[in-house]
Amino acid sequence: MASIQSKKTKAGVKIYYVVVSVKGRHKWIKAGTQADAKVLKKKIEALNATERLEKLGISSRDKRIDEFFQEYLDHVRLRTSPNSHKRYRAALNAFIAFLRIFHSNLKILRQITPETIEDFQQKRLESIELKTLSDDEKPGNHLHKRLPLPQTVNYEVSVIRSALIWAQDRGLISLVPTRKVKPLRAKLTRQARVLTIEECKLLLKTAKEVAKTDKSMRVYHDAFQFLLNTGLRSGELCNLTWDDVDLKTGLIRIRPKEDWTPKSYSREFFLNEKSVKLLGGFGNKEGYVFKTASGKQLEPDRLRVVLIKVAKLAGIKGLTRVHDLRHTFNSLMQMNGVDPATMGKILGHKDIETTMIYTHQTQEHLRKSIEKVGV
């Protein structure tokens, strides 16, 4: 509530004030004349509760940044998949690490300004120290990776923005400081490495040769073959259980587990003959489909390490991501005449535009395609 009060100076001049009372606390704001006081009173009463507290400097709802982010992550955990929660946590941890290194005086949520966010963008792209500290907060070890790309920083800022909008909705801040911050210009990422049929065969042949002297490698040969025939994401393959597979019908289901959720929606599709035959040859059909020799769940990071090793032995250049096997699968389907809608259903894409990103045609296919026209 706001009221107009006046006081007389020693010279007998009456000075008018607007007195604001909030939760038992009072703030006298000097206005001057009575007309000035009326105008000021209207302006103050037009503010919402949070703005009034902040402008008067008597906010009783100051929230520490680290405490707020933890509350927000608890909110996110209940409403998103575990993987999304991890990504949100990594992004917010990067921002907290930035504040710790470059703005140690910023502790309160409402102290974050647009300039703070812009400085985060710049430091995130340039600071090795910030990258190291941020990666230490993430699950797994990412120290071998380069500094983040602009699109990665844009994603992190979007997570920060979501958190700050949540704070605004709860009256903790009046304005979202990311509102005036422009995203960084994204850099072009490298093209997917799509294998030819010959390269697919060479990859599997090399993995099989390695497995002859190292039995622990057998599961990786099988995993690569299955990925090339199904287009699964590495996380989907590593979390696939025998309850998700029906070898009699060839149906496979990609669905959430207690501690894992697929990146896209749950889906099901039929395996091809090669995949059914591969799984049919497995001995122990309990628990995870793809597991190590000791019976442990296969890990995506280890799958990538082995892929790079086998590709190098096979002389296949540029193959450094398990996800490239997914690109290869989709492209092989497309070059064999499978329509985009069907490809999207198998891959778990929500729209055809995403599916088309995964289609890459080999030079030989393009050459043969143009030869089909001979006017």
Image: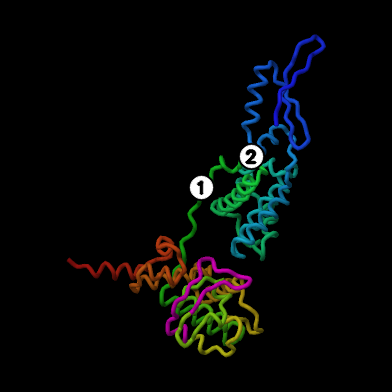
Residue underneath mark 1: 185
For residue 132, what is the image quadrant?
bottom right
Whole-angstrom CA distance, mark 1 to mark 2, is 28 Å
In the rendered structure, which segment of residues is drawn in magenta?
252-276
- Residue 100 place in picture, x, y as percent: 73, 48
Residue neighbourhood size for the residue with mark 2, other residues' Cα within 10 Å, grouped as few (<14), some (14–19), many (≥20): many
Q: Nearer the viewer, residue 114 or 200?
A: 114
Q: Nearer the viewer, residue 140 or 340?
A: 340
Q: Residue furthest top?
A: 11
Side (left or right) of 158 relative to 250:
right
| Nearest-to-viewer mark from 1 and 2 | 2
Which residue is at 78% across, 17% downward? 7
Residue underneath mark 2: 174
- Residue 96 place in picture, x, y as percent: 69, 51
Q: SS for tag 2?
A: loop
In the rendered image, residue 242 lying in the magenta stretch gets the answer no
- Residue 326 place in picture, x, y as percent: 47, 70
Q: Amino acid at mark 2?
A: Ser
The colour scheme of the drawn protein is: rainbow
